[in-house]
Image (cartoon, rainbow, N blue to C red):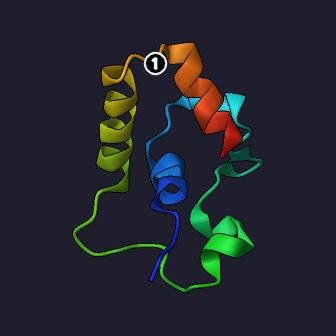
Amino acid sequence: ERSFHIFYQLLRGASPTQRAALRLDGQGGPLSARNFPSLAASGCTDIPGVDDAAAFGATSAALRAIGLSEGEAAEVFDLL
């Protein structure tokens, strides 16, 4: 079982600009959950039928819906 789904969503759904700002790109390209021991430890980095990128889009839309600006949302993601 995965925990803290937002981390998986962020790794799959962040834009290139967001990835750069959050330092989620490695020398070989985008980092994945397998690059983070705390996420990879469960052995469950993918869930069949779950689109983490789409879920990240929904989370971003929800943050906008409650009135957060793009900058404020970026600060929330930076906390992660």
Q: Residue at x 51, y 47 (%)?
A: 10
Quadrant of the image occupied by residue 60:
top left
- When the figure is inspected, residue 23 is found, relative to residue 5, above or below; the finding is above
Residue 68 appears left or right of 77: left
- Measured as percent of width and height from the top left, residue 32 is found at 59, 60
The extreme front residue here reads 66
- When the figure is inspected, residue 7 is found, relative to residue 53, above or below; the finding is below
- When the figure is inspected, residue 37 is found, relative to residue 14, above or below; the finding is below
Q: Which residue is mark 1?
A: 68
Quadrant of the image occupied by residue 33:
bottom right
- Measured as percent of width and height from the top left, residue 11 is found at 54, 51
The extreme left residue here reads 49
Residue nearest the viewer, comparing 50 with 3:
3
Q: Residue at x 64, y 54 (%)?
A: 31
Q: How many marks?
A: 1
Residue 49 appears left or right of 11: left
Q: Is residue 32 in view from this perspective?
A: yes
